[in-house]
Image (spheres, rainbow, N blue to C red):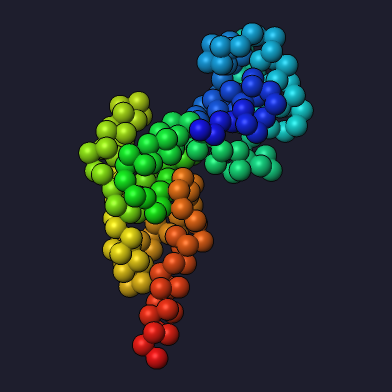
Amino acid sequence: MALLTDFFVSKVRAKLLQIFLSEPKEIFYVRQLVRKTGEEINAVRRELKRMEERGMVRKEARANRVYYSFNKNYLFYDELLHLVVKTSGLGRELIKNKNKIGKIKFVMLSGRFSRSLDPRPGDVDLLIVGEVVLPQLAAVVRGFETKLGRDINYTVMSKEEFDFRKKRRDPFIHSILLGSRVMLAGDEEELVAGGQQNEAASNENRQ
């Protein structure tokens, strides 16, 4: 199973990134981060200083505390967010249980869900395409609904249905594909363009 520590020498930084990017709307003071990471306070302070120097985090003073938040304008913000989504929370559980969930072609989490933004009416947080064992998927999702305190809006469909609806420019599928996403399984280019490829192949076979 892939972990953030695979990509970062500092385990303290890996833990801090996971905290900041799992809750991107939140700000944290040092002792909060110490409790959440389980690391020594001096190690956390040193890493926060390094991250601030590199433009990864911002700090601000409020009352008698200094708070830190991740800088969303940091050059590699999106790439780091994708890493965190895949190695923690619902993303990690879906990847870990992929084979139990079924024969999966695509799994994606919406960009809004990944950024902990409030859902809009009709938003789909999770799309899974393939032959899915629904009770197994529901069990994984339910655990995170409890943690989030809200329902996770997910959609499941077969590859055949997905390709058919995409080829027909189904508004529901079109709206999903127009949004941002984090791919947990499958090729994003195929997710977006597969229907067009299938249509071209069908036309060629009819000629």
* Residue at the farthest bottom position: 207
Q: In this view, does 181 lie to the left or right of 64?
A: left
- Front residue of this view, candidates 22 and 68: 22
> What residue sits 31% from the left and 69% below the top?
164
Q: Does residue 56 appear in the picture of this structure?
A: yes
Q: Is residue 10 left or right of residue 69?
A: right
* Residue at the farthest left position: 135
- Front residue of this view, candidates 84 and 63: 84
Please state, as top left, top right, bottom left or bottom right, where the C terminus lies in the image.
bottom left
> What residue sits 32% from the left and 42% below the top?
101
* x and y percentages locating residue 145 in the rendered image: 31, 31
* x and y percentages locating residue 119 in the rendered image: 37, 43
Q: Is residue 19 above or below residue 46?
A: below
Q: In this view, does 149 lie to the left or right of 43?
A: left
Q: In this view, does 89 lie above or below 160?
A: above
* x and y percentages locating residue 142 in the rendered image: 28, 32
* x and y percentages locating residue 169 in the rendered image: 35, 70
> What residue sits 51% from the left and 33% below the top?
1
* Residue at the farthest right position: 53
- Front residue of this view, candidates 127 and 204: 204
Number of numbered discs visible in the structure rendering: 0
- Front residue of this view, candidates 154 and 163: 163
Q: In this view, does 195 lie above or below 53?
A: below
Q: In this view, does 200 lie above or below 17?
A: below
Q: In which quarter of the image is residue 83?
A: top right
Q: Does residue 24 appear in the picture of this structure?
A: no
Q: In this view, does 202 lie to the left or right of 56?
A: left
> What residue sits 41% from the left and 73% below the top?
198
